[in-house]
Image (spheres, rainbow, N blue to C red):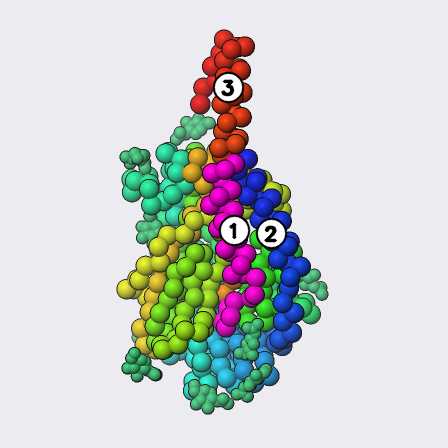
Amino acid sequence: MSTFKADLVCSVLLAVFGAALGILGNGDTFRRKVSVELNPGLTPPSVLPPGVGLVHVRGLGLNDTLHFVLCNAGAPALLVVHTNSTQSAVQVDWPVFINRSSSGSLRVEPQSSVQYSSALVFTRVWEYDDVNNTADPQQTAESSFYPPYELQNFLWTLNVSANQSDLTVTLCGGEKTESFLNGSLCLQFSAFESEGRDEAWPSLRHNANSSQLHVWLDGVTPRGNDSRFALEFRAALGVTIHSCHDSVSQWVSSPVNSSGVVGYNLWKPVAYRKPQPVFEDATPCKHSQLVSVNRIPQSGLVQAYFTDDPHTYGLNISFGIDKDPVFYSDSKYISWTLLVGMGEPPADSFSTLIIIIITVGLGTPLAIIIVGGVFVWIRKRMSHSSVYEPIN
Ligand SMILES: *[C@@H]1O[C@H](CO)[C@@H](O)[C@H](O)[C@H]1NC(C)=O
Ligand SMILES: *[C@@H]1O[C@H](CO)[C@@H](O)[C@H](O)[C@H]1NC(C)=O
Ligand SMILES: *[C@@H]1O[C@H](CO)[C@@H](O)[C@H](O)[C@H]1NC(C)=O
Ligand SMILES: *[C@@H]1O[C@H](CO)[C@@H](O)[C@H](O)[C@H]1NC(C)=O
Ligand SMILES: *[C@@H]1O[C@H](CO)[C@@H](O)[C@H](O)[C@H]1NC(C)=O
Ligand SMILES: *[C@@H]1O[C@H](CO)[C@@H](O)[C@H](O)[C@H]1NC(C)=O
Ligand SMILES: *[C@@H]1O[C@H](CO)[C@@H](O)[C@H](O)[C@H]1NC(C)=O
Ligand SMILES: *[C@@H]1O[C@H](CO)[C@@H](O)[C@H](O)[C@H]1NC(C)=O
Ligand SMILES: *[C@@H]1O[C@H](CO)[C@@H](O)[C@H](O)[C@H]1NC(C)=O
Ligand SMILES: *[C@@H]1O[C@H](CO)[C@@H](O)[C@H](O)[C@H]1NC(C)=O
Ligand SMILES: *[C@@H]1O[C@H](CO)[C@@H](O)[C@H](O)[C@H]1NC(C)=O
């Protein structure tokens, strides 16, 4: 009960600060012309396996191009490539790509125009039995983990929808098991022509140099009554990038000998338990330490694009908070949103993130103390007036 109230207080604060920051928009007028193509250049006899697709989204600037490539051959991945040319194009050697995804079978030409490239790969969904109710995979005994769902083995459906202002690609997948009979893991990619803010929570601010990934796990039958989930993802970075900063809930990369931010992945530390959430459907999410991973992820896109072994990092995002009474089985839904882009992150993302950290840091303990105090007082009153002690 107390955590529920604490969540509520946090959500209210988040919404208030979010709204306040929204008013202070920074009037960014930079635009890109966004277009989309599915499986560029694919002709018979080459065919992709059922449900597998490669979506190329081109964001054309005045003298540069931002390419996004989304592909679910193997683990689903998003590749971001920035070039200093308006003529750059994605070229796929389809027979080789389909057969083995050998390195070099997907290129952005001319290669000399490439300024930056990075890829994000969603690798696994972890499920654990949170018997101690810590909502923290790192404090959970290894024996409480169920075998992870390997996203490279999922069967997917791909849906591209575009209108004048927004472009959306939806990938939903699952496996042929009891757990996924009525359930799916979905990734929704959005690209934007200009600056704006998503209407749906967490209402991340975006610009023409960013894209958004909304991830949700819907209707999956948990393997335990106290199941919680965590999402594992990897980032693969081209060789020109050497440092990676894991500051709170954002992950930016800087080039060699430069302090400027080149690419970023960032998110608000919040997840939602309903598709159309109200305040109390928000729950915090936590991320593990960013770790360097030796193996290149099992994604056809990453294997085909990077010619030299990329630098690969990984982390887990876990959902819920210590003593959270709501487990996955109660709502059978969790969603989380991530912004992926290049250049400076949209103006308010930094400040919003910091404010959220302050509210989660100060707001939660404070609310627990207040609500907890009231709760103890009510329990004392109840134990005087009733023969039954509440058991919990
Ligand atoms: C590219 O265009 C931007 C404005 O959109 C301008 O600031 C920049 O100098 C241009 N770069 C080159 C190399 O022309
Ligand atoms: C597919 O890859 C295998 C090696 O893994 C190779 O022997 C075969 O010739 C390739 N097939 C085509 C059509 O490229
Ligand atoms: C694009 O960048 C490359 C180096 O990455 C440079 O050699 C080339 O001159 C640049 N082209 C333009 C049009 O700025
Ligand atoms: C529960 O917490 C105890 C004490 O912190 C720990 O020893 C135990 O391994 C935890 N159990 C699980 C399943 O994580
Ligand atoms: C694809 O998405 C559109 C819009 O979101 C939806 O109306 C349509 O039913 C979807 N198609 C499939 C096959 O899921
Ligand atoms: C485009 O689609 C998005 C989401 O599918 C919707 O929110 C937006 O209102 C649409 N815009 C137009 C101009 O139809
Ligand atoms: C899937 O949904 C059907 C119909 O809604 C239901 O009868 C069945 O029990 C569900 N299966 C699981 C594993 O949840
Ligand atoms: C899960 O909960 C149901 C009903 O609440 C109970 O029958 C079942 O034994 C529980 N399963 C486990 C593994 O605790
Ligand atoms: C980057 O810095 C290192 C030393 O800090 C230097 O050896 C190297 O030449 C620099 N590279 C570039 C491209 O300036
Ligand atoms: C994610 O969590 C699982 C379970 O704790 C762990 O085995 C795995 O190494 C973690 N992955 C990363 C990238 O930290
Ligand atoms: C987006 O990228 C273009 C080209 O690199 C740059 O001119 C512009 O300032 C960037 N916009 C933002 C908001 O970062």
Residue in the image at 67% along x and 59% along y:
23
Residue in the image at 63% along x and 67% along y:
26
| Residue underneath mark 1 | 356
Q: Residues within 10 Å of mark 1 (few under 14, many from 20)?
A: many
* Quarter of the figure with the C terminus: top left
- Of 3 and 75, nearer the camera is 3
Q: CA distance from mark 2 to mark 1?
A: 8 Å
Verify whether residue 354 appears in magenta.
yes
| Boundaries of the magenta span | 341-367
**Residue 328 x %, y %:** 48, 40
- In the structure shown, which secondary structural element does the residue marked by tag 1 occupy? helix
| Residue underneath mark 2 | 17
Q: Amino acid at mark 1?
A: Ile
Q: Is mark 3 within 8 Å of ligand 8?
A: no
Q: Residues within 10 Å of mark 2 (few under 14, many from 20)?
A: some
Q: Earlier in the sequence, mark 2 or mark 1?
A: 2
Q: Amino acid at mark 2?
A: Phe
Residue 379: which numbered mark, if any? 3
Contact check, label 2 and label 1, Cβ < 8 Å? yes
Q: Is residue 388 visible?
A: yes
